[in-house]
Amino acid sequence: MKKNKEPVYYGDYLGLDKLLSAQQPVSPHYGAEAHDETLFIIVHQAYELWFKQIIHEMRSILGLFRAENLPDEALMTVVHRLQRIVTIQELLNHQIDVMETMTAQDFLEFRDYLVPASGFQSIQFKEIEISLGVKRDKRIAFDQASFYNRINDKDRAYLESLEEQPDLFERVDAWLARMPFLETQDFSFWKHYERAIEEQIERDRAIVESNTLLSDEERVQELAELENTRENFAALFEPERYQVMRDEGRVRLSQKALQAALFIEMYREEPAFNLPYQVLNSLVDLDENLTIWRYRHAMMVQRMLGSKIGTGGSSGHEYLKRTTEKNRIFADFMNLATYLLPKAALPPLPESVRNSLRRYSV
Amino acid sequence: MKKNKEPVYYGDYLGLDKLLSAQQPVSPHYGAEAHDETLFIIVHQAYELWFKQIIHEMRSILGLFRAENLPDEALMTVVHRLQRIVTIQELLNHQIDVMETMTAQDFLEFRDYLVPASGFQSIQFKEIEISLGVKRDKRIAFDQASFYNRINDKDRAYLESLEEQPDLFERVDAWLARMPFLETQDFSFWKHYERAIEEQIERDRAIVESNTLLSDEERVQELAELENTRENFAALFEPERYQVMRDEGRVRLSQKALQAALFIEMYREEPAFNLPYQVLNSLVDLDENLTIWRYRHAMMVQRMLGSKIGTGGSSGHEYLKRTTEKNRIFADFMNLATYLLPKAALPPLPESVRNSLRRYSV
Amino acid sequence: MKKNKEPVYYGDYLGLDKLLSAQQPVSPHYGAEAHDETLFIIVHQAYELWFKQIIHEMRSILGLFRAENLPDEALMTVVHRLQRIVTIQELLNHQIDVMETMTAQDFLEFRDYLVPASGFQSIQFKEIEISLGVKRDKRIAFDQASFYNRINDKDRAYLESLEEQPDLFERVDAWLARMPFLETQDFSFWKHYERAIEEQIERDRAIVESNTLLSDEERVQELAELENTRENFAALFEPERYQVMRDEGRVRLSQKALQAALFIEMYREEPAFNLPYQVLNSLVDLDENLTIWRYRHAMMVQRMLGSKIGTGGSSGHEYLKRTTEKNRIFADFMNLATYLLPKAALPPLPESVRNSLRRYSV
Amino acid sequence: MKKNKEPVYYGDYLGLDKLLSAQQPVSPHYGAEAHDETLFIIVHQAYELWFKQIIHEMRSILGLFRAENLPDEALMTVVHRLQRIVTIQELLNHQIDVMETMTAQDFLEFRDYLVPASGFQSIQFKEIEISLGVKRDKRIAFDQASFYNRINDKDRAYLESLEEQPDLFERVDAWLARMPFLETQDFSFWKHYERAIEEQIERDRAIVESNTLLSDEERVQELAELENTRENFAALFEPERYQVMRDEGRVRLSQKALQAALFIEMYREEPAFNLPYQVLNSLVDLDENLTIWRYRHAMMVQRMLGSKIGTGGSSGHEYLKRTTEKNRIFADFMNLATYLLPKAALPPLPESVRNSLRRYSV
């Protein structure tokens, strides 16, 4: 057996010669070595290692979603690997604490030597964003401009090729839209559901109107928001109005996908929905952790640079904070909460749906 | 000895009869008990316990700052207790993970029963904000209106009395402004410092202009920001212009306090500055953790309610996100990074300052 | 509707009058208040709040396991609530960081006043241990003696009544032992499995013998352990020998339960095993977090008291470290790894099992 | 300036070509790639990156301790860098969560291919242990044998050369033993201190004897431990008896160093002791985090292998758990708590000591 012929040595297996010779601070070329430049390098290298792992998981997940339908075995793997990405993200959030052991003044000792290198040039991070669904047209204007400059042609070409491929958002949207049970002809169900939501909104209106603690200004604002909710809800079932919401960027999922997601959230205790629910929930965790990381990272940059510009010539934390909310991908699943019903108020599933579920789960 | 007369029993000492009988879910009054209401209650009670601990530390810290000058012993205690608050804040951030084990649908089972109760009614949280320095005039318009309604008269009266008292921001500002070494008449020092900063800004300009990777739009923007930095810096030494910056809310510290903070940051390795530096650094940690908590809390609310209004009739996460940046207190210390110099570029401390430092540290 | 009649107020709903008046430091009765006694009280009260939440989840989980068979809906709830306990445990582990902001010397300022109160008197913690499965006969001798003294009669009576009731370990053991697919008469399967394990052990023997890096002492030891593994494995299928292992405390699960657990671990990608696998995995997480907490807690006590005795008259960290491994409950599930096979080496499931699985999952 | 001549590119600066080409799974050489082998490689590579950073800090800290006396500036740097190591350790502890997303069965898919590679071959980890103070003679017998086999000659030679050099424990011991104030001739001070400790022990005896909740067995045990404490304490001041304690491995610090540490702990609010106290405290944090990591790592191995032997032919978690307590380095500082006095009971510092402190702190 091969392993008898070539016993593996820890250091060779892990390529430690390459790995541990890849820390080349530049400060010694200009004078005394800046002690903290090693930390700066290793923190970023650790990020890149974890980005590679996240990409490894993303590719396998995207591969599984390519299939026409996903059996439970495949969904289990999807959930397991999404949860692994979520666990890695929690580690990346902690890693900011390590970076923050470097003071702003210590950073100044080598900052100028790094010009114009910048975290914006992390191709792996951009690959993660693109393969999740942060495509060019989704970015803020400034970002659309800057996303593809600052990197060399080879890297740009690679990322642009990724833009052509289906991303996780699109795969999940298509998977949801395909769900068979949506074809139910049982209109009484949607009617029942619509009525229940109307009642919920009326209860909320009563809350606002009877709340003597609210200022008039607040009351007006809340009632307007309720109207807003009512209209958004109505739009869920009217293709044209839904399209308007979508064009305005108030929702990103296709109408069929959003309806399926709503279904899964509400009836998640149906065995057939258990795994789909875990998929949606993992995507919300992933989106939340990425957003928290963006926000913490922006604060760390502010702490390091104040309002000074970054080595890449970007305005640092202001820019980063602008992208925090804008670059969210799966926020629609969070916003579903707006349209949920308490278990007790749920209309019983029509037989036609139960049947398609049974077929679906086999 | 008393302890021989009355041996202490764990449960009595901790008042467990009171503590563990304070969980009174309301859902049973309306039907079946909602299993997760207990979690909802205990999560909020745990917050209130920790808020009480934070207030306990805040009061002792404010008490210490009341003194005309703070000897090293007092500063050590201040740092120790600020760091304890920071450690508690990290726990509060983790606590959001526990709350998020409750799904939006499970929350719906008892949400309506809580109306119009709301986290906005946490008097202890408001006390923490006020005693840190989030005073009425610092709040966003909407918040100024809402901060004092929704709570009963007794609570309002208590909080308004707190508004009259000096808060931590004011105490720290006064402590910094008092620092003796600022009276130095050695103008050559400030000149030297000003020149060094000018050079830094020129280097940054070179970075931007030589950075072929920037789009014209970006270059224009960055150069404008550099001009901005230059003016802000100049304003540090011109009382009138500083006052303008302050009126515009671009800086909150008094001019003398900001200069002292800059001094401490740059010369923090002077033994006499070690503890003052630890104080400033702890305040930045505290401000950062509170801001992260606000942001994570806003996301958790979005996850629980979508765009639905909260039980207190507030629009939930939108409002909360608006306050995240607005309610920061010690951001000026973070922004100091803009005006720091690398150790090598620091002008040597003038003898007049060294002397006042020696006096100061005794 | 009731909520219109009685609007809920945040502070009343959370019983803050009780909750926030339950901190009664004793140091003021003996002299100056010890500043950190409040921290000491609040840390322990926060623990008790979370213990109450864990007990709330434990009771609902034990209730679900009382049923003759658990449909997928019930298993989903079990997994969800076990995972919530795990999330709370992670919070309790972080809470030790807060306690450690109190120095040993600061503790000395009020330690003597607490005598003989002790954490050993936390009835809720003992309830959690008992309901998980740390029953009297499972404890170390010293602990068997001490577990029930130091507490008053009422508390002792309550805990002793709990000892009579089935605990989670017993419920899970019975649930596993009941699994229908174990009745398969297809002996070829077990034969196949046995052969595969034998091969695995032989590969391990080759590893040890061919490993030139091992000292003779090590090689002898490893080969002995391999023999040990072989015998343990054989015992899995021979009731008498299994009973011996169990009597010696090398395994705690019943033979049928262990076999079922092995099955579930190996074939967890069978849809019918997905939820049972998540149950086992959550129990391992729970056991691991409790063990880590015990260990960290023991270190914290050492840091606070050195080798001094605790206020309850116990020898502190030495005792606590002794219980860390001894009080583990679900270690058998971790040790299953010893008998797992790579997916590729798994014998195909016999038809008889597939059928019972199908029945089982409906 | 150089940076104008050669603009730095992010990927080149971080050596990403080397770094991201160092993941070479071996499973593809034997059949299908095992998906999780990439995770296994990257987790270990991330550890090695952080080990390199810890070594970078350790070397600078050891360098600073080489000086005859350490001015406050140097101690500030020592504390800052020790705290950075502590922050990295917290990250390494979190990293175990990522590793645990790999199941035992998934590991089996490639485990055999790695033989006989093993984490015991991490030279950087061994360097960290040696430079902290885990020298050959400090190890458990089994470990003394195994520490230096399993690695190639070059690596062994390197580690053996490290054994010759002074480690952090020795440097800290010497630094403490040198402290000038220990030369005080004011015997009344030690008398006062001794009397205060005697009183403390008598109070503890009263606690034990008056504690009706203790079983006789417990009472006997506790009183014996008290006698033990009394003798250990007496030994602190009698060179011969201290040497006995040290030979028995009950204490590791030299007598003078231990006395100095006691002094610093008790009088840490003396400005001159502030930084030395932070050094001791950071060393305790470091020791605690390393110990927790060892324990968690042992549990992770148990979860992955059960009682199976590791790929390096070691018995896995049993061995690892044996080393957890044995390899502690700075436990003496934790155990100091045994001999502390409450601030109120502290004898006033003799003038002779105050004077030497003043000299010391300048």
Image (tube, coloured by chain):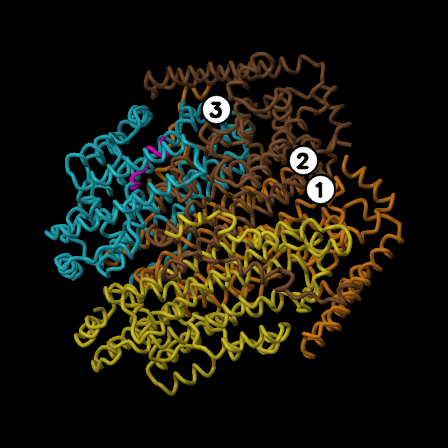
Chain colours: A brown, B cyan, C orange, D yellow
Amino acid at circle 2:
Leu
What is the secondary structure assignment of the residue under circle 2?
A: helix
The answer to whether tags 3 and 2 share a subunit is: no
Range drawn in magenta: B323-331
- Whether tag 2 and tag 1 are in contact, CB under 8 A, the answer is yes
Q: Is residue A299 magenta?
A: no
- Residue plotted at (22% across, 51% down): B263
Give the number of the mark in front: 1 or 3.
3
Could you tell me the amino acid type at mark 3? Ser
| Residue at the spot 28% in from the left edge and 35% down from the top edge | B228
Find residue B63 and report its horizontal and vertical position in percent.
Answer: 21, 48
User: In terms of depth relative to the viewer, which is nearer, D4 or C17?
Assistant: D4
For the residues labelled 2 and 1, the Cα–Cα distance comes to 9 Å
Q: CA distance from mark 3 to mark 2?
A: 26 Å
User: Which residue in the protein does label 2 denote?
Assistant: A275
The residue labelled by disc 3 is B307
In this picture, residue A44 sits left or right of residue D198 = right
Left or right: where does residue B203 sit relative to residue C168?
left
Name the residue at 86% across, 52% down.
C189
**A64 vs D176, nearest the viewer:** A64
